[in-house]
Image (cartoon, coloured by chain):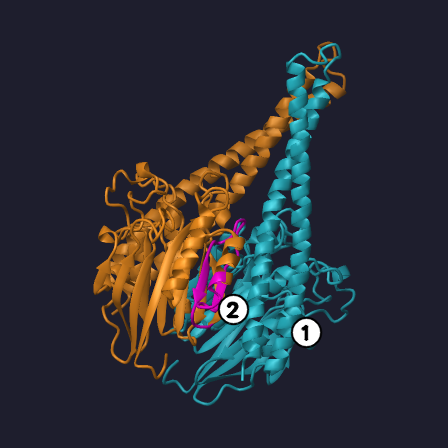
Chain colours: A orange, B cyan
Amino acid sequence: MEGEPTLRLRIFDLNCWAIRYLSKRRQERVRLIGDALRREGFDLVLLQEVWSEQDYSDLRMKLAGCYPFSHYFRSGVIGSGLCVFSRFPILDTLLYQYSLNGYPYMLQHGDWFCGKSVGVSVGVTAPLLSLSLQLHAEYCREKDAYLPHRLVQAWELAQFIRHTSKAADVVLLGGDLNMHPEDVGIRLLRGWTGLRDAFAEATRFEGCKNGCTLVPDNCFTVKSELLPFPLGIRIDYILYKAISSFTVKCEELKTTTGPAPGTDIPFSDHEAVMATLHIQRRGQPVGASLGTADLVDVVTEARTEVGVGLRAAQRQRYSSGRMAVLALLLLLLQAAAALGILAGLGAEQPFPKLSFCLLAFLALGALVLATGLHLFHTMEVKMLHGTEDQMWMALRALQERP
Amino acid sequence: MEGEPTLRLRIFDLNCWAIRYLSKRRQERVRLIGDALRREGFDLVLLQEVWSEQDYSDLRMKLAGCYPFSHYFRSGVIGSGLCVFSRFPILDTLLYQYSLNGYPYMLQHGDWFCGKSVGVSVGVTAPLLSLSLQLHAEYCREKDAYLPHRLVQAWELAQFIRHTSKAADVVLLGGDLNMHPEDVGIRLLRGWTGLRDAFAEATRFEGCKNGCTLVPDNCFTVKSELLPFPLGIRIDYILYKAISSFTVKCEELKTTTGPAPGTDIPFSDHEAVMATLHIQRRGQPVGASLGTADLVDVVTEARTEVGVGLRAAQRQRYSSGRMAVLALLLLLLQAAAALGILAGLGAEQPFPKLSFCLLAFLALGALVLATGLHLFHTMEVKMLHGTEDQMWMALRALQERP
């Protein structure tokens, strides 16, 4: 980048919704995405929810000519689903897994199994740090049980960006944040890192109204979930930040609308976000991050939500612990009864072997389950508590700022 | 640090072995550690295995006068056990959890439950990045089943240091690495980050022979484990690195020997490591890291070991998957038999309710267990595979170096 007066960088970001056996017309869509990427020739492509390594390999084969560099981030049971294709060399990669990511027993919300993480690739001769990521999904906006987890993720992400971006000239983040633009998690992430929203900064915009990326017009979206939002919602973002003596301007932002060219289906249930950035040496970074007072407000708000989550997790830890103790007591009682029988007590009455066996089985099952839950919620409490502490430290540092 | 010609930094590092109910004379030893820290007045204290938050709180109360800044890192079921006390302000903290850390079913080796992590604190007016950490324990040197996990941790740690240290002037790492100085993990960590070993660099040394920190003379160590090493082993380290225009020199390194002053017991089963560093502005960093050829060798060696671990994990994933399928088949067979009985088939023979119940219970237990194991080993495979990939990318980058 050095020595070059202006670098024009075209970025493509898409949540591909490519879940094997579950996503509709997956292979066809992955093929369409590959075709479009090859045709358009972006500089950097950040994809999420590419859950199958086969799909990644197919894409890589197809795109080898125009995107010679790529990386697939592996984590969790299923994978992280993240991959990146680049026209410029990827010099290094790093994977950061969030410490909290939903509950293993919420099988219908598969987040826990996905190993959600940030995939970082350092490339374009080192100064560009690009992050591809996905945060925990929001399943119910009114009663969002995952808000504390998503806030912990947003905080960890912000801290991670602060600590890893210092040697970069430009930080670029693309992904499905699963948060609306005004949500506390987005405000926290943007405020704490100084990242700017390409949609808000773009000189030209073209695409779905308000930059929405999950729209009712898309044939794959669940219409009932979008009922309160007739225009759709914006949850996929391209965020960026210039460090040191660089400036970044967003010349143009686009989203896809309707079906992919020449077909009857869109690329995914999400719309793709495409940004054209101008990166220039010299000059002061445009636009400041939040003022201290605003930052204190947003960190305080986030910390309150994390505190709510902490108390809920403490209650769950307590009740699962109590259940484990009760199950253990029942088992001990049964053992005592069995010993009594063996010792010849109550031999005059017939012993109900089957019910006894079933009861023992139930008690043992409850014990194992409750112990597992107790351990899980103990970890959850530790992480929420740790995040609350870190936020408190951040608030203290903010308040001591001159 | 700026403007000051030389900073003399005294650092204390100790694996405190403070496990509630398990560690011998824990409270007494924590009190002794607190007394010594207050008396000696170090600049920075990095402690590991402080598993009880109560112990941390007690230490914090006691040390508030001489170490006004401290942080306890929370993670995992039990905690990370890491804490840091500092005479200088701690500006920010960050916790990085390793993606692999042993097996949950190896209850006798509690590593999985500990949430082993690196605690990073940024302090002394920002330029000092200090890390406190502990890697997976080695339980059997001859047949070290955890070597791939420890190597993944060493690699993640090295990558983490590379990415977070760029804005720091000095990186300082203290902890129980559970590796001997010549082990591939240590060589990987040092080679890939350029960290230098305070023991090797120290102008003066005082303490146990060869700088050993787990010695047979310590009354808490398990003598049988140290039989092949009559002098003991060195597994606790202070490593450091100067960045940009700073130089760091290790003036003195000490380890504790024998019982704490005025008592009959040592601080812990590990010996403490104490370093006095001189940090100076201007001048070139002393001592280079490994040459490219050596670095290629060590990364290749580490990658081979990770590959061995990967194949073992794949075998375990396969066999647990097969066991789950067999258990499921057995359950289905039983369900078919039960349906047959209900449909009136074989009604002339007495139905063995109890054995049937017990068998179903066993099959269900095996199914749950095997599925859990399968999921766990799937994650393990992903992480080992991901690390192998990252190392391959690193090797390619090394080989392309001019």
Residue furthest to the front in view is A262
Packing grade of label 1 (10 A; few <14, some 14-19, many >=20) is few
**Residue A233 lies in the magenta-colored region:** no
Q: Quadrant of residue B323?
A: top right
Is residue B265 something one can see in this rendering?
no
Please give the residue where the numbered disc 1 appears in the rendered image: B182
Subunit under mark 1: B
Q: Which residues are magenta?
A: A62-89
Tell me if A17 is positioned left or right of B274 in this view.
left
What residue appears at the point 39 percent right and 80 percent down from the top-left corner? B1
What residue appears at the point 74 percent right and 13 percent down from the top-left corner? B350
Above or below for B70 versus B339: below
Q: Give the main secondary structure, helix, strand or loop, of the magenta stretch.
A: loop
Q: Earlier in the sequence, mark 1 or mark 2?
A: 2
**What is the CA distance from the residue labelled 1 to the residue labelled 2?**
20 Å
Above or below for A369 versus B150: above
Q: Quadrant of residue A98?
A: bottom left
Above or below for B315 versus A72: above
Above or below for B317 versus B387: above
Image position, residue B365 (x, y; %): 65, 34
Which amino acid lies under the numbered mark 1 shown in the image of this protein? Answer: Glu
